[in-house]
Amino acid sequence: DGGITQSPKYLFRKEGQNVTLSCEQNLNHDAMYWYRQDPGQGLRLIYYSQIVNDFQKGDIAEGYSVSREKKESFPLTVTSAQKNPTAFYLCASSMAIAYEQYFGPGTRLTVT
Amino acid sequence: DQQVKQNSPSLSVQEGRISILNCDYTNSMFDYFLWYKKYPAEGPTFLISISSIKDKNEDGRFTVFLNKSAKHLSLHIVPSQPGDSAVYFCAASAFGTASKLTFGTGTRLQVTL
């Protein structure tokens, strides 16, 4: 049963702490992506990776970091430098040459 | 700079009628367009797509129309069902951009009984 898993579904952190969001896929997809959704806004691309050990900044990468050590995993770290970290975070994956991206269930991060 | 725009934040349609969701884009390099459906607190699910070499693509109750000269696309749902109530996002990609998608802000569709 292939898919994308994100954990946890809800995450609470104090301001000033770094937090890492997990994303795992067993679809054998080469490319993986992280998006952020805020109320009334579309999905905005944070980082993406087309192959292992390589990733690129998206439109809003400031205050975030990623790693891609394994094809199946693409964790996102929200650092204390991110000014407005409270949001709904979505991970997606796709085949390298395909446009269609498949999304995980999301993690809602609340920072107080 | 919003390159993909969904100007209607919400739409209400009666069950059985047609739902028409609209999307405009400004980047002439976009050559592939997708529609996603999203329920609250869940990830978006892929619905239907269209390449710029076509002007229509149909899949069951869902049809997407593309008007390249107007830089406009629309999603038609016929007949609308209560389970179609969700937020619909339009997305676009340009060849050679590593499958990066640019999303619109979404339209919330409410299908009433």
Image (spheres, helix red, strand yellow):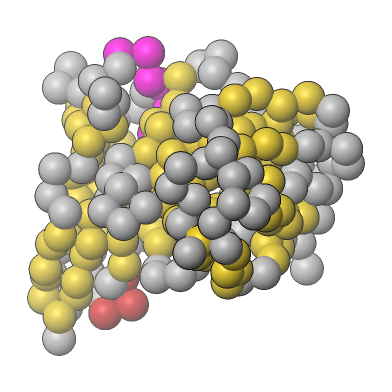
Question: In the image, is residue B49 part of the stretch drawn in magenta?
Answer: no
The residue depicted at 30 percent of the width and 13 percent of the height is B28
Can residue B76 be spotted in the picture? no
Residues in magenta, as a range: B28-34
Q: Would you identify the image quadrant in which residue A66 lies?
A: top right
Please state, as top left, top right, bottom left or bottom right, where the N terminus of chain A lies in the image.
bottom right
Res. B102 image quadrant: top left
Is A26 above or below relative to A66?
below
Q: Is residue A88 above or below residue B48?
A: below
Tell whether A97 sits left or right of A29.
Answer: left
- The image position of residue B94, as x and y in percent, is 45, 19
Residue A12: image x %, image y %? 57, 69
Write the residue at 15% across / 60% down. B10
The residue drawn where x is 59% and y is 25% is A57
Q: Residue at x 46, y 70 (%)?
A: B41
Q: Is residue B82 visible?
A: yes
Q: Furthest residue to the front? A: A16
**A7 or A102, which lies in front?**
A7
Q: Is residue A39 left or right of residue B70?
A: right
The spot of residue B72 in percent (x, y) is 20, 30
Q: In the drawing, does residue A55 fall left or right of residue B36?
A: right
A30 w.r.t. B108: above or below: above
- In the displayed orientation, state which residue is furthest to the right: A70
Q: Is residue A15 above or below residue B49?
A: below
